Image: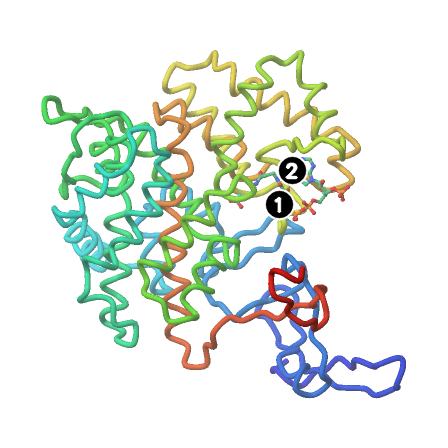
Amino acid sequence: MADNEKTYTLTNDETGVSIKLPVRESVQGPPAIDVSSLYKDAGVFTYDPGFMSTASCNSKITFIQGEVGILEYRGYPIEQLADGGDFLETAYLLLNGELPSQQELGDFNKLISRHTMLNETLKHFFGGFHYDAHPMAIMVGVVGSLSAFYHDSLDINDPDQRQVAAHRLIAKMPTIAAASYKHNIGEPIMYPRNDLSYCANLLHMMYATPCEDYELDPIAEKALNLLFILHADHEQNASTSTVRLAGSSLANPFACIAAGIASLWGPAHGGANEAVLDMLAMIGDVSQIDKYIAKAKDKDDGFRLMGFGHRVYKKYDPRAGIIRDVCHQVLERLADNDNPMFELAQRLEEIALNDEYFIERKLYPNVDFYSGIIYRALGIPNNMFTVMFAIARTVGWVAHWMEMMDDPRQKIGRPRQIYKGYPRRDYRPIGER
Ligand code: CMC
């Protein structure tokens, strides 16, 4: 059914005055009641802190049906894309709406690899950070600073410049991420190698040194590729909404993505993968699980089971299921069968999934629950987990930013509020207070 044919009627119970609100249909998923003219027509706002029931935009990129654990990029189920697909192929799909042909993928690979280097001056920025700065702090700063270097892709009204900015961001994220890591461990920053795949190049920049090449571990490359596909987009999550909101003021794309990175860093969002490993280390042993489950259920205790729960998924997060299976394979192939963290995580999951508190609230493991265990097995330090997420999610952020900028009806994002402060009062000079 087309938009506007269905309506909802909202009635003021005091005055009996009714107003008809049009319904906007989705291709899949629930429709939305369009309340955009409500204030103009009825003088009231809608109230929805945390956007529990609010669709903030139209989008053609990603579809999630949380009640049944469905995730699709441009209509393709995540399970199919993750099964042997390539991260840059997924990136092309998210950006352009269609899977690439062999020729198109080859061209896209070349295009991205042409932008992998950083301006030499930009490298000085890393030296300005304290040696033990969290790599996410460096990412926020350095990605934002790209706006000061690439002036030829800052005109957001020019679709070609928007494309160049998008490609630059996708290409330079691994270089910036690896440089953040190198700064952290006090090693020289490595240049990218454009003969390697996106993920192999990242591993090279993280682990090679000027004295020694990195011998590519195909298991690590494959696992990263898979995790990056799973992390590439997730519709209007907090960081993507942050990017869209920042972009709605017509801010430049580098600044918008820096805002997205800052939002992703929080432990309720992408920072959860690092927090999961911290939590597992804190629990330490299977014998302690009951104590921590009790803490997670105690409303007077701030502790939550990290890597559990999701605003949208009320069933197992399909990404978590894929990652758990891959975890088995990676640990087996790395001959790391006796991985106490993985055993602890599996036991914790089993206990939580049988606990009334978690069952009632539909709290299942999310994408972050097992991803850290794979990263750890690949030798990636805990403070780089969220950086890995940020590299992959840049594709989604950029795709959403481009979609929004392509829409001539896009407006500045400007929510309203219910004011609960003082009513008007008069200023008194300091001596009279
Ligand atoms: N441990 C214990 N209780 C929980 C948890 C948890 N991890 N998550 C939610 N709850 C409880 C919560 O206390 C509330 O209980 P009650 O109804 O009795 O007050 C109920 O479940 C609903 O929780 P909520 O906080 O209202 O749900 P939300 O949709 O606002 O929050 C969430 C979703 C992901 C922020 C939350 O589940 C959480 O904090 N999880 C832990 C952090 C985490 O793993 N984040 C990664 C999310 S997925 C990847 C990503 O976004 O990047």
Which residue was labeled with disc 1? 310
- Tell me if 346 is positioned left or right of 327 in this view: right
* Dot 1 and dot 2 residues touching (CB under 8 Å): yes
In this view of the protein, which residue sits in the foreground, 405 or 369? 405
Residue drawn at 44 percent across, 44 percent down:
230
Q: Is residue 45 above or below residue 106?
A: below
**Disc ID at residue 364:** 2
In this view of the protein, which residue sits in the foreground, 288 or 313? 288
Label 2 neighbourhood size at 10 Å, few (<14), some (14-19), many (20+)? many
- The kind of secondary structure element at disc 1 is loop
- The kind of secondary structure element at disc 2 is loop
In this view of the protein, which residue sits in the foreground, 181 or 317? 181
- Tell me if 194 is positioned left or right of 145 in this view: left
Amino acid type, mark 1: His
Q: Position of residue 289 (x, y in %)?
A: 67, 19
In this view of the protein, which residue sits in the foreground, 95 or 184? 184
**Ligand 1 is within 8 Å of the C-beta of the residue at disc 1:** yes
Q: CA distance from mark 1 to mark 2?
A: 8 Å
Quarter of the rendered structure image containing ligand 1: top right
Q: Is residue 421 above or below residue 38?
A: above
Residue drawn at 43 percent across, 45 percent down:
231
